Amino acid sequence: MKIYNTLTKKIDDFVPNEEGKVKLYTCGPTVYHYAHIGNIRNYIGHDILDKTLRYLGYAVTRAMNITDVGHLTSDSDSGEDKMEVARKREHKSAMEIAKFYTEAFFVDFEKVNCKRPEIVSPATENIDEYIKIITKLLEDGYAYASGGNIYFDISKLDNYYCLTNQDSNLVVGARESVDEDSNKRNQADFALWFTTSKFENHELLWDSPWGKGYPGWHIECSGISLKYLGEYLDIHGGGVDNIFPHHTNEIAQSEAYLGHKWCNYWFHNEHLIDESGKMSKSKGDILTVSVLENQGYDPLAFRFMCLNSHYRKQLLFTYDNLDQAQSTLKKLKNKVLSLSKEGEKDSKLFDHYVSKFKEALSNDLNTSNALAVLYELLKDSEVNDATKRALVEDFDRVLSLDLLKEEEKNSDLDAEIMSLIEERKEAKKNKDFAKADQIRDDLLVRGIRLIDTREGTTYEMIKD
Ligand code: AMP
Ligand code: ZN
C-alpha cells in the first residue's frame, strides 16, 4: 500500500515494523460536546484506513483515546480545560459530561458504520502512565518545573519541527495571539503537567510528585499509545489541525522518553468545511449525524459523500451535496438489491475486480476510484449477478455502505404494503389496470414507491 506521510511529505510505500502486523493510533474526540459532522468525517477517514489495512491482509491493532481532561480552550497551553467549561455550562460533574458525550459520540460513529478500535481509553484512566513518562523526562533533562507546572524544553531537541518543517520564528509568530506564559523558558515549550489553574473550582485533579494537578493534552496520546501499542508505532493519525502543536509535541515527548524513533507514518485528514469556513464545536449550533438523521437523511449518505472525495482534500458540506449523495446511494443500492441471487460465482472475474479495488485503495486510499470500480462492475455485462453480489459484499467490508442490507421495514406497515402488492398483482392478472394503478398511486401519496423488477415488486420509502 502507498500512503501519504506527513513526516516525509510524500506518498510512501507502507512497510510495517513487524511483517503482516499494524499498530495504529487515532486521536479521539474531546468529549465536552457533541461530535460534529466534521469530526465524524475525520473518523470515517480513519475507518477506511483501518479497514483497508485489514482488507489487504494485515492484522491491525488500533487504539484511540477519549480526551476527558487536559484539552484547553486553546490548542496550546492557554485557556480553561474544555471539560471544566462544559461542567460549568451544564452544571454536572466532568465525569458525567464525559460519559454523556462519549456515548453520544459512539452513537454517531456507529451510525456511519465506523468500527470501534480494539482499544478505546479515556485520558483520565492512564494518569500513572503520564506520571511515569514525565518523571523520566525530568530525570533526563528534557523537562523542567516552573511556577508549579512541568514543561517540555523543546530546545533539547534538534528536530522538534520535523512534522511541520516550520522554523521556530514562524511558530512563535503564530502563537502571538496566545497568552504568554511567564513560567516557560521558551514560549514554544509545552506543558506536561499543570498544578496551577487561573480558573476557580477546577475539579479534575490527581496527586502527583509535583503536587495535585492534571495532565497536559499531548501527554495523554503518547501515554495511551505507549501503554497499549508499545514502543514502535506504525501509523498515527488525526485531523490536519492536530499536526501542530499536538502531534509535534507527541513526537517530541515520546522520542525523548524512548530514546529512539517512535512512529513511522503520520496520517492526516483534511477538514470538512461549511459555507462559513471550518466547522467547530465551540461555534454554537452543532450539526451532528443524529441531527441529519432527524432531518430525514440516511447517515450512510453522509459516509458516501465523504467517500466520494479524497481524505486529503477539504470537503464542502452543503445540503445540496448531501441530497445528491443520498439519491446516488439509493440508486446504487437499488441496483445492487436487484441483482439476482441465482447462479455461480466466477472466481477469475471475482479476483480481477478485487485486484482493481485493492489497487484503488492502495493508492493513498483513493475511495472515489474504489467506487468507480464498483460502478464499472455493476455495468459489466460479462459478469453474472452472483459474481457481482459476491464482489459487492466483499467491497462493502471497506466501504461499509450496507449495500446488500435490505431496508428495515416496519413490520405492520410492511405486511400491509405486501398485501396491497399482492392485490395489485391479482388486479393486473385480471386486467383490472385501473385498480392496479389506483393501488400504486395511493401508496405513492403515502410516500411509498413501488418498484417493479424481474423478480417481482418491492417498495421504497420516499424521503423528502
Ligand atoms: P476534537 O473532538 O475537537 O478533539 O476533534 C476530534 C478530531 O476531529 C480531531 O482529530 C480533529 O483534528 C478533527 N476535526 C476537528 N474539526 C474537524 C473538521 N471540521 N473536519 C474534519 N476533522 C475535524
Ligand atoms: Zn492525540
Image (cartoon, rainbow, N blue to C red):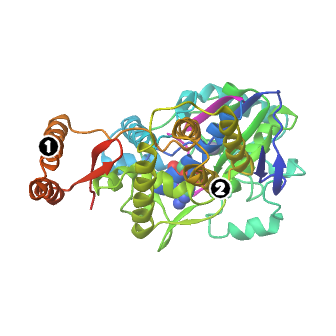
The answer to whether residue 299 is visible is yes
Q: Which residue is mark 1?
A: 426
Q: Residue 60: within the magenta? A: yes
Quarter containing the N terminus: top right
Q: Position of residue 22 (x, y in %)?
A: 73, 31
Rendering quarter of residue 218: top right
Using residue 194 as the reference point, say whether residue 114 is left or right of it.
left
Q: Position of residue 432 (x, y in %)?
A: 10, 53
Image height of 258 relative to 422, above or below = above
Amino acid type at image mark 1: Glu
Element class at badge 2: helix
Amino acid type at image mark 2: Asn
Q: Position of residue 10 (x, y in %)?
A: 83, 56
Instruction: Name the residue: 38% across, 41% down.
Output: 104
Q: Which residue is mark 2?
A: 369
Instruction: Name the residue: 81% across, 68% down.
Output: 169
Circle 2: is it few (<14), some (14-19), or many (20+) Cα within 10 Å? Answer: many
Pick whichever, 101 or 396, lies toward us. 396
The answer to whether residue 195 is visible is no
For ligand 1, tell me if the residue under mark 1 lies within 8 Å: no
Q: Position of residue 398 (x, y in %)?
A: 58, 40
Q: Which residues are magenta?
A: 58-79
Pick whichever, 64 or 198, lies toward us. 64
